[in-house]
């Protein structure tokens, strides 16, 4: 794997910064996806191989998706709740696969992390951090971490290789979505080091019985507009990952180019958007959709957002849900009527 000169320089300054620390906090996304989990693990490996710093990996929410749960179980990761952490108690704080103020992490607003490594569009606040490496063109943050590990010649054991490989594969949908040469190179590099048997088990992670009920609800509620847009409400979900998972599933429909799924969890409306329409940017769409009411962000073909519901009555939150789907259709210039049900029950 070729490591760019930029990575080499960045790795040196990252290690320099980490060497100053006795303790470090690594913050992942809330309800972390495999890329977020693998990146945290990669960063911890850099710290462990070069410094004496004690690492704590933390997040808020849950690891819900069956594949992600299987991954966390395999790597035997000790994950902590971010709400129980006081960032001031750590010498260095880091964020991976997310940035300050994006709304998809629970790091206290107003506190600047020291280190941010990510592949989402760069935020104003991020620029104020001591160390940043934001590569928007990269398919995954795991790819960046893989380059760092190669650059410092760290040994990548099978669990870490498997996690990074899965992080890249899942963010890029097996290199089919927003992947660049660097992602492909990283996959080639990691593949011989990863545990292929476990990788295959992770991809077929077991689900609990509720999963099918949630899926049935989503399918039942899904509406198709102009034969190309699907909107589905999942109602109250105790597994927020389900929203993105169902959006991915609808994206597989032959004729669908745009999907919006939303559901309620922890006093928030959570939104997932997927698009295969070249003329539409999912990240921008979600921004316009949540407006000032919430936060959101993402990539060209996939994005997510959240709007806090605290204090809203049931009726008001139902109105907000309606408003979101109406606004989504308006942004796509698709009429609200007529629509058809995705499936007949
Ligand atoms: Mn990512």
Image (cartoon, rainbow, N blue to C red):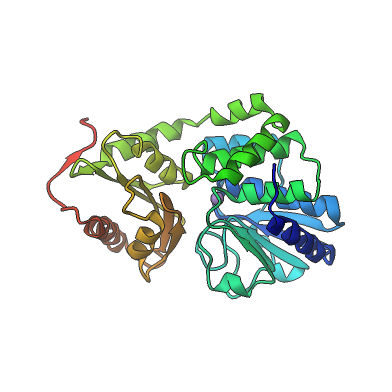
With respect to residue 291, does 160 lie above or below?
above
Quarter holding residue 38:
top right
Q: Residue at x 69, y 59 (%)?
A: 6
Residue 158 placement (x, y as % from top left): 74, 34
Q: Residue furthest left?
A: 338
Residue 175 placement (x, y as % from top left): 52, 38
Residue 114 placement (x, y as % from top left): 69, 68
Closest to the observer, 240 or 164: 164
With respect to residue 205, does 104 lie above or below?
below
Q: Residue furthest top?
A: 197
In this image, 274 relative to 71: left or right? left
Quarter holding residue 243:
top left
State which quarter of the image contains the C terminus: top left
Residue 209 placement (x, y as % from top left): 46, 30
Q: Does the rendering let one see residue 98?
A: yes
Q: Residue at x 46, y 42 (%)?
A: 177
Give the number of marks. 0
Q: Residue at x 69, y 37 (%)?
A: 189
In this image, 141 relative to 221: left or right? right
Closest to the observer, 10 or 114: 10
Q: Residue at x 68, y 36 (%)?
A: 190
State which quarter of the image contains the N terminus: top right
In this image, 4 relative to 32: left or right? right
Q: Does the rendering let one see residue 72?
A: no
In this image, 209 relative to 221: left or right? right
């Amino acid at each position: 794997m070729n490591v760019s000169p930029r990575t080499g320089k960045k790795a040196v300054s990252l290690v320099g910064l980490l060497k100053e620390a006795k303790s470090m906090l690594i913050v992942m996304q809330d309800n972390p996806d495999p890329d977020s989990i693998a990146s945290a693990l990669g960063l911890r490996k850099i710290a462990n191989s070069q410094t004496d710093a004690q690492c704590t990996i933390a997040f808020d929410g849950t690891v819900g998706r069956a594949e992600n749960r299987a991954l966390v179980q395999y790597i035997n990761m000790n994950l902590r709740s971010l709400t129980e952490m006081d960032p001031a108690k750590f010498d260095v704080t880091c964020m991976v696969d997310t940035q300050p103020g994006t709304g998809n992490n629970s790091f206290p607003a107003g506190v600047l992390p020291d280190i941010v490594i990510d592949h989402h569009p760069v935020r104003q606040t991020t620029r104020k951090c001591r160390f940043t490496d934001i590569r928007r063109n990269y398919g995954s943050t795991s790819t960046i971490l893989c380059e760092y590990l190669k650059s410092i010649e760290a040994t990548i054991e099978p669990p870490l290789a498997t996690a990074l490989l899965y992080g890249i594969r899942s963010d890029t949908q097996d290199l089919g979505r927003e992947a660049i040469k660097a992602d492909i190179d990283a996959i080639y590099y990691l593949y011989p080091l990863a545990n292929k048997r476990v990788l295959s088990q992770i991809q077929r992670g077991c689900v609990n019985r509720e999963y099918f009920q949630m899926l049935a609800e989503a399918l039942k509620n899904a509406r198709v507009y102009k034969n190309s847009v699907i909107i589905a409400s999942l109602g109250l979900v105790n597994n927020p990952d389900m929203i993105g998972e169902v959006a991915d599933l609808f994206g597989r429909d032959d004729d669908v180019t745009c999907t919006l799924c939303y559901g309620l969890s922890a006093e928030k409306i959570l939104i997932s958007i997927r698009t295969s329409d070249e003329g539409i940017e999912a990240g921008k769409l979600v921004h316009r959709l949540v407006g000032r009411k919430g936060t959101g962000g993402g990539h060209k073909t996939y994005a997510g957002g959240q709007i806090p519901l605290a204090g809203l009555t049931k009726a008001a939150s139902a109105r907000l849900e309606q408003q979101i789907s109406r606004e989504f259709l308006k942004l796509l210039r698709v009429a609200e009527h007529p629509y058809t049900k995705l499936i007949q029950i």
